[in-house]
Amino acid sequence: MGFTALGVVPFGRAWADAPLEVLHGYTAGSVTGQIARFVGAVLASKGRPAPTVRAIPGDHGFAPVPAFLAGSAGGSRVLVADTLTLMMNGVAQGKLSDVERLVPIAKVTNGYSTALIAGAASGLKSWVDVVSTARTRPVVLAGSGRLSAYGPAAAWVAAAAPGVTEVDARGNDQILEAVRSGSAGIGVVTTDSIAAAMARGGETPTVLATFGAARSPSFPAVPTFAELTGDRGRTYTFSYSVFAPPGSAPSFVETIARDLAGPFPSDLVSALGQLGTRVAAGDAPLVRETMQRDLRVARSFL
């Protein structure tokens, strides 16, 4: 108290007035891009200038990390990323030490779950159908690559059903279209994207399995992949967190953490549509705990 009278800037004010850049991987229209814009909007709602949100595509969503680490330390940048992608790329590329340099600030979503789907053109109605068909002919699985958030599901399916081959179809919409058109027999997408597709009407895929630890509330009759295979280790979700560069001032980290502590403005959550159902605030220790869990998932198949 009394700092203002002494001419000292009150806690956090300098950072609130400084221009801020929000970096993320993939493209602006991706799930990651939408969450990054949400983070920028939340920060702007706290009275700071609207941040610049910038996508750095490429390298399976890992491209922003080297750029983020290469910049000067300070209170001008934050990174929005799903921690599973960070840990998988860290393992696969031998860059875990880079990931460990990131400074966790806050978690902004709970876990998004993925599902294995099939289209009508494939004739596949169940996981048993996938396994038996893959024994006699290749079954094409559309996903976003082994180092994407859909990677664990795709890897586990291919391991459990030899004969499944993977093709990249970037993003939920392209994967859904590949399955609908028959260019892929099966695909891995988020459960939320299926719910959104059902709400839009038209042909919807058959959900064969989900990859969470428990059955999805959206598809309670659909078994988990762990149930189907008898392997309880075959479960995961992915979630989004916000990071500061190494060497950032503690006051900057604390200020951003406070601004992202929730509750989030309801209009900003609603603007995310189906993605907004997973929005939830979490602190830095929860980010670290999630990263350790995601590291175990990454090492299960890489």
Image: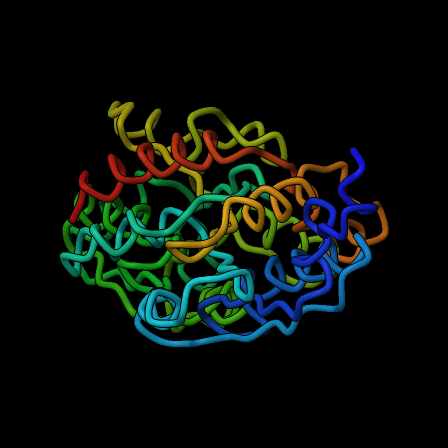
Q: Position of residue 230 (x, y in %)?
A: 26, 23
Q: Position of residue 266 (x, y in %)?
A: 84, 45
The coloring applied to the image is rainbow
Judge whether residue 197 can be spotted in this image. no
Q: Residue at x 54, y 67 (%)?
A: 30
For this view, does 204 lie left or right of residue 268? left
Q: Residue at x 35, y 59 (%)?
A: 148
Of residues 244 and 83, the one drawn nearer to the viewer in this rendering: 244
Of residues 103 and 171, the one drawn nearer to the viewer in this rendering: 103
Q: Position of residue 92 (x, y in %)?
A: 17, 56
For this view, does 155 lie left or right of residue 270? left
Of residues 240 and 256, the one drawn nearer to the viewer in this rendering: 256
Q: Position of residue 136 (x, y in %)?
A: 16, 56
Quarter placement of the N terminus: top right
Total of numbered circles in the picture? 0
Residue 220 occupies quadrant: top right
Q: Residue at x 55, y 66 (%)?
A: 76
**Above or below for 83 versus 52:** above
Of residues 47 and 209, the one drawn nearer to the viewer in this rendering: 47
For this view, does 59 lie left or right of residue 272? left
Judge whether residue 203 can be spotted in this image. yes
Q: Residue at x 65, y 37 (%)?
A: 280
